[in-house]
Image: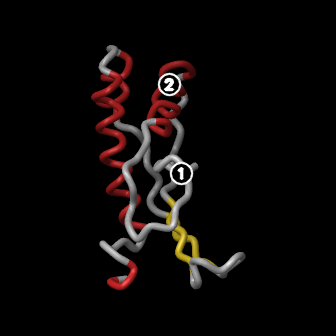
Amino acid sequence: MFPEGGSHDQSDLIPFKPGIAIMALACIEKTGQVPQIIPSGIKYFKRHEFRSRCVIEYGRPYIPSKKMVDLYKKGEKRNAIALMLKELEVRMHEVTMTAPSYNEL
């Protein structure tokens, strides 16, 4: 699942879409089960070459906090989602190489 809403070839992360947070928090609310999200970064050797070799780096498992879950359950869904996306972005930066441009990578 791509929290940015799809794959892309830009040199930095693009803004995350709320889908990943909505799915995780709704899952907790409806089932009581807490999913683990594993941040993953894909680094291509030749990004514009079809079937280029790549390295996948896995980050620390992420679990939404009790504060987020409580906010979501109380109806403060936008706040809960914003908190989760902010934390996920930090985790994604741990496993991706980003820069303002490809020349700087």
Residue ID at (32%, 26%): 78
Residue that protrudes farthest toward the right in the picture: 51
Kindly identify the residue that appears in the image at 58 percent across and 49 percent down: 1
Q: Which residue is mark 1?
A: 2
Label 2 secondary element: helix
Question: Residue 70 at what x, y percent from top left?
Answer: 33, 22
Amino acid on which the number 1 mark rests in the picture: Phe
Q: Residues within 10 Å of mark 1 (few under 14, many from 20)?
A: few
Q: Nearer the viewer, residue 44 or 64?
A: 44
Task: Locate residue 89, reporting x and y percent.
Answer: 35, 53
Which of the pair 62/20 is nearer the observer? 20
Residue for point 35% across, 40% down: 84
Question: Based on the displayed image, in which of its 4 quarters is residue 63 positioned?
Answer: top left
- From the viewer's perspective, tell me whether residue 50 is left or right of residue 80: right
Q: Is residue 3 above or below residue 65?
A: below
Badge 2: residue crowd in 10 Å (few <14, some 14–19, many ≥20): some
**In the picture, which quadrant includes the C terminus?**
bottom left
At horizontal 48% and vertical 57% (from top left) the residue drawn is 39
The mark nearer the N terminus, 1 or 2, is 1
Give me the C-alpha separation between circle 1 and circle 2.
Answer: 18 Å
Q: Nearer the viewer, residue 32 or 98?
A: 98
Task: Please give the label number shown on residue 93.
Answer: none
Q: State which mark lies toward you, 1 or 2.
A: 1
Q: Is residue 52 left or right of residue 96?
A: right
Which residue is under mark 2?
26
Q: Point out residue 6 in the picture as x, y percentages from the top left corner.
A: 55, 51
Image x and y of residue 2, in percent: 53, 51
Hey, which quadrant is residue 95 in on the image?
A: bottom left
Image: 100 above or below 15: below
Relative to 4, say whether 80 is above or below. Answer: above
Relative horizontal placement of residue 30, taking residue 17 as reference (left or right): right
Q: Amino acid at mark 2?
A: Ala
